[in-house]
Structure formats: C-alpha cells, structure tokens
Amino acid sequence: MNVTKELLEHLQVTSFSVAHGGRDILAQLVRIEARSWTFALSEPIASEADAELQFRIHFAAALEQEAAFTARLSGCGGDWCTVIISEKTESALLKNFIGTLLAMEIRYERFGRRKEARLKIGSGNARLFGLTGAEQTLFLPASRIQQPCVVLDASVHGIAVITPFSSGAIRNTDTLLIKVAFANPAESIILQAHKVSMRLNRVDGGKTYATISCQLLEPVHFAWKERVIALLEKEERPA
C-alpha cells in the first residue's frame, strides 16, 4: 500500500527519522507491505544488508509522544531504503499505528481488486457519499478549461463523470483533474485521472453531454478511498 503525506497527517504523524552516523536523518514512509516498509531518505545511508537501524516516529503535538523502533535493513539505494519492522521494541503507541496501517492495507486490497466494486452516485446518492451536492468540477489542464460535472459512479481506483460537451478539448484530452467537494471541507480533494473511454449523448433541447470513465492516477487520495470503502462496507451489511 502506498502511504501518502495526507494519510500520515490523518494519523497525526509529523515525521520519521533514522539514526545513522551519530545523527538523525529525516525519513518519509512511502509504502508498506505488512512489516516491510519503504522510506524516502533526506540523504543516503551506508549500511550492509540485515543491519539493524533505529527509527523514531514523531506524532503531532496533540499526542505529545514519539516512539522508537528497530528495523532490519533489507534493501537500499541512494535516497531510499526498505526495512523489516521488528516486533521487539514496539510501544503501545507504535502497535496502534502499525495496526491501523495494516487494517487499512487489508481493506484497500479487498476493495481495490482488478475488477473493482463500483458505487452508483449520481444526483440521488451524492449526499449519501458525503458530497456537498451533485455538481462537482472538472478541469482540463492542457486547455485550461473548467466546467461542471456530476460523479456517476466511483470505485477505489476509478471514477465516471458526466459533463457538458462544448468543444473538442475533452475529446483530445487524456488527463483530467476532478475537484471533489465533500461536506467536510478538510476532505475536499482534487483527483488526477486518466480518461479510459468517452461516450456522447444528445438530450432533449439539443445539448450534448460526455460520459467519461477514468482510472484514477496514483497516489489516490486516502480520503477518496475511505469514502468509497466505507459506503461499500455499508452496502454489504444486512438490512
């Protein structure tokens, strides 16, 4: 699972550091696979494979805590390293953090399979999904065009929208930006998407609309994943 800055902020983590050469080097957690964690480093470290490294995780001031943990180096290359987290030096705070990450990883893998479950949104379910309303915003970066759109369906790694077709710019654009405004302003995000397909429909009155199916580009914002998965889990519960 990729770990983004927004996800760490949500978990109230401010930074990581690793002790090396008598001083602390800043580290940024970027990916986890169970207890295998990959960090981006502010500068290279020179250590042999299987060497033990001492890390510290620093939490937000509200928690007023930090935790130390030992990890075994399994690979490194310049400004990154991959380590295996030890279970021996875990504090209760660290155990809670690891448990939360692992639970997220399991949920994301379950709902992020190749053939993903999709949610029907549209105007009827926009507020149930947590949006401020049906109308959202589509940006075409190459042509600097901004126009309204409605989210038709959603999955962990995909989105479909309908938007007015007023020029050929949409037809010629592969990368789109979709601003999704949730009722909680802190969760309002911009999704970067790759256009997979587009279908044009003419409605009464002569207006033409484009229905666009997209794959969301990594890293997909955790707030989007959480919203999609929470509603999928809700749909799975017996009535």
Image (spheres, grey):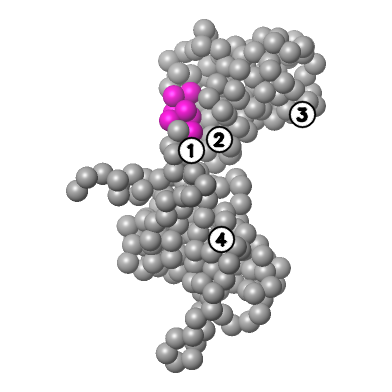
Give the percent coordinates (x, y) of residue 183.
39, 56
Q: Which residues are magenta?
A: 97-105
Taking the magenta stretch, the answer to whether it contains residue 194 is no
The answer, for residue 185, to whether it is visible in the render is no
Disc 2/disc 4 C-alpha distance (Å): 21 Å
- In which quadrant will I find the N terminus? top right
- Rendering quarter of residue 147: bottom right
| Camera-nearest residue between 63 and 19 | 19
Tell me, yes or no, whether the two marked residues, 1 and 2, touch with CB atoms within 8 Å: yes
Residue type pointed to by label 3: Asp
For disc 2, the marked residue is 1
For disc 1, the marked residue is 109
The answer, for residue 17, to whether it is visible in the render is yes
Tell me, yes or no, whether the two marked residues, 2 and 4, touch with CB atoms within 8 Å: no
For disc 4, the marked residue is 214
Q: Nearer the viewer, mark 1 or mark 2?
A: 1
Residue type pointed to by label 1: Glu
Disc 4/disc 1 C-alpha distance (Å): 20 Å
Q: Name the N-terminal-most of marks 2 and 4.
A: 2
As drawn, 48 above or below 149: above
For disc 3, the marked residue is 79
Taking the image as shown, residue 188 lies to the left or right of residue 131, namely: right
As drawn, 91 above or below 2: above
